Amino acid sequence: MPIRALLCPPSPSRGVSLRETIQDLNEAAEDRYWEAYELAVQGQPYGAMYLFGYVAEMFLKSAGFLFDGASLNDQVGPRLGPAKVFGSSHFSHVHCESYHSILFWAEFLIEKRARAASGRAGPVPFPVPLASELRIRAMRIHQRWMVEMRYRSPRVPPLRGSSISIGDELLQLMEDVSWMRDNHSKFWR
C-alpha cells in the first residue's frame, strides 16, 4: 500500500460515510478520552485539553439525543437542527457555537429532562444536585476549552483569561470530563 494511503484518509467523495451515529459518537468519546489522557501523561497539556473538551461535548450530545428518544444506530446530523430550535425556544441565552458549546449541550440535556412527558418510566427531571453539578462542571469546561484551541499554539495566551497554571487547569478539566464520562448513563436513563 502506498504511504500516501496510510497518511491521508479517503475523501468523502471516495465513498467514506460521514453519517456518524450515536454509537459512533460514544465510541469516539471513549477513544478520545484515552488519547487525551495519554497526551496529558506525556506532558502535552494543550493537546490533552483540546481532546478532553471534545470528549465532554460528545458525551453530553449523545446523552441528550438518547434521552430524547434516539437509538444508538440513529444518525447525529439530523438531530442537530431540532436541538438548536429547542435551545432557541427554551434557553436562548446559551448559544450553540456551531453545535460545539458545552454549555448548550448541558442545558439541552437538563431542559429535555425537565420537559419530558410524564408517561416516561423512571425519574425524568434531574435531581437538583445532579443538575447543579452538571452546570458547574459544564461552565468550568467552557472556561477552559473552545473549538478555536485547534488553531492556537501553546505560546499564544489563552482566549479566556485564567489565573491558574496550565497544569492545574488540565487537572480540573480532566476531573470534570471524567465526572461526565462516569455519569453519562445517568444523564440519559
Image: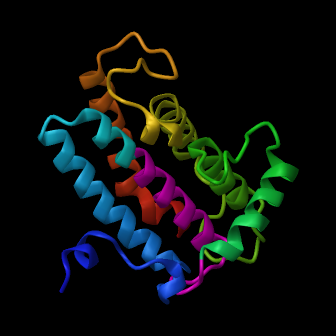
**110 sits to left or right of 135:** right
Q: Residue at x 68, y 60 (%)?
A: 113
Which residue in the rendered view is the most extreme toward the right? 89
Q: Is residue 147 magenta?
A: no
**6 sits to left or right of 132:** left
Report the quarter where the N terminus lies.
bottom left
Give percent across and percent down for residue 35: 24, 55
Give percent across and percent down for residue 20: 52, 77
Q: Is residue 7 visible?
A: yes
Q: Residue at x 53, y 70 (%)?
A: 189
Q: Is residue 74 magenta?
A: yes
| Residue 115 occupies quadrant | bottom right
Q: How many numbered markers are drawn?
A: 0
Which residue in the rendered view is the most extreme toward the left? 42
Vertical placement of residue 42 versus 22, above or below? above
Q: Is residue 174 visible?
A: no
| Residue 125 occupies quadrant | bottom right
Vertical placement of residue 126 versus 140, above or below? below
Vertical placement of residue 116 versus 176, above or below? below
Vertical placement of residue 59 versus 152, above or below? below
Give percent across and percent down for residue 12: 52, 80
> How does the figure colour the protein chain or chains?
rainbow
Examine the residues drawn in magenta and state their main secondary structure: helix
**79 sits to left or right of 139:** right
**72 sits to left or right of 28:** right
The region drawn magenta spans 53-75
